[in-house]
Image (cartoon, rainbow, N blue to C red):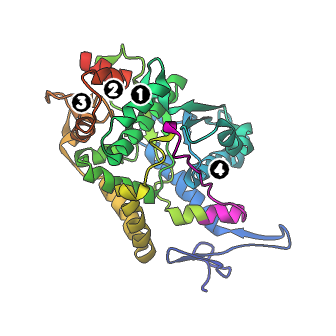
Amino acid sequence: MNSCIKCKGAQATVDIRFAVYCEYNLLLVLIYSECFQEQVYHKYRMTVAKACSDHNDLAGPSKILLALSSGSASRLLLHFSQMARLKTPQRPNLDEIHVAHILEPHETEEETRDFCDPYKEHLASYSVVPLSRVLGRKNEAQKLNVLLQSCRTENSRECLLRILRFALLVKLADDLGCRLLYLGDTCSRMAVNIMVDTCEGRGMQLPWRFAQLQQIIPFSKFTFLLILPLEVRIVRPLREIVDSEVKHYLQLKDPNWRHSNITLDESDPNTIYAATDSTKFPDFIFVGFVAELDAENSATVSTVTRTTAKIQTVISDLREWQPCALCLAPIDTTDKGLICHGCRTIIDDMDIGEDLLSALPSYTEAIFRK
């Protein structure tokens, strides 16, 4: 193996994505090198800096909500947020990090809290929130189950779940007064989402969904809707890092690390939207495709995400926007509809009777009744 491409001196010990790095620890801490880990962390820092560089109101310390799941990318994102504080402990006014985990019926609160325990010292708050809270109604858990059961196809149910998770995270960020929401989407995950969104008829929204700094549009016409945020910006700090780099980094930090697998009880009606055959979703097909693409052509996956952020579509030139009543994506104010094409497909696939609005989230109903 050749010399490390970063320090140019030591013999490389890590070969990943057609690049080689040194990574070793000899004689305890007398001879120590972690070029690969430093390179991955540098991508994280540069992505955050680039996202906020053109926005003066985001300069300096920020109040940040970090979305946490039980996946490997979330763990790396949480780890990097801690590293950023430890590397500059004397710097005054460090970012205030809040962590939120959306609890789904197949998870327990104890499992999620154990996941976050090593980092609690550096967190301003940590909350576990049930997904049903996004509805903003009485008997939320029961109503969420009814809503998801109303979807005729598993694909529509999975699309609706993604929308509800996103909307709840935005609401939590607004409730906490966080200007920034960090999502753990890697470059690989973003490439998958780009293809899935295109298949779902959301191609027009791609520049907004995958921008360096995704901005929730101003809801000046809906300020009475307390559930809708007025100003939340979304950053994906791992957008330059692929899944193989995430897994290799975590295994170097902890050789015993393994991604947790959750066993679902398919006989439990509360897990109806979790205990489904994932092979039927477009995500499953595209995940394998992206992994093979990255293994054979390492630069292609990152090129897909970078190019998507630069695409110009109809919404790129809109001066006046209004939110889609379900997914919150921008739509033209001159359009008579209040739902984007992708969400219209989901609603058309539902079989919930005449009282559809009362089954959807309260913010959706309020926008329609407006």
Looking at the image, tell me whether mark 2 or mark 4 is earlier in sequence order: 4
- Position of residue 119 in the picture relative to residue 355 (left or right): right
Q: Residues within 10 Å of mark 2 (few under 14, many from 20)?
A: some
Asked if disc 2 and disc 1 are in contact, CB closer than 8 Å, the reply is yes
Rendering coords of residue 245 (x, y %)? 55, 65
Mark 2 vs mark 3: which is more N-terminal? 2
Above or below 206: residue 177: above
Of the pair 108 and 162, the residue shown nearer to us: 108
Residue, disc 3: 321
Along the line of sight, the residue nearer the viewer: 328 or 160: 160
The residue lying at 61 percent from left, 50 percent from top is 75
- Could you tell me which quadrant the N terminus lies in? bottom right
Q: Earlier in the sequence, mark 3 or mark 1?
A: 1
**Residue 354 shows up from this direction:** yes
Q: Are marks 3 and 1 in contact (CB under 8 Å)?
A: no
Q: Is residue 229 magenta?
A: no
Q: Is residue 56 left or right of residue 306?
A: right
- CA gap, disc 2 and disc 1: 7 Å
Query: Earlier along the polypeptide chain: callout 1 or callout 4?
Result: 4
From the viewer's perspective, is residue 107 above or below residue 320? below
- Which amino acid type corresponds to the residue marked 3 in the rendered image? Trp
Q: Which residues are magenta?
A: 248-270
Residue marked by disc 1:
231
As shown in the figure, which amino acid type bears the numbered disc 1? Glu
Report which residue position mark 2 lands on.
218
Q: CA distance from mark 1 to mark 4?
A: 26 Å
Q: Which mark is residue 79?
A: 4
Mark 4 closeness class: few <14, some 14–19, many ≥20 residues within 10 Å: some
Is residue 252 a member of the stretch shown in magenta?
A: yes
- Asked whether residue 309 appears in the rendered view, the answer is no
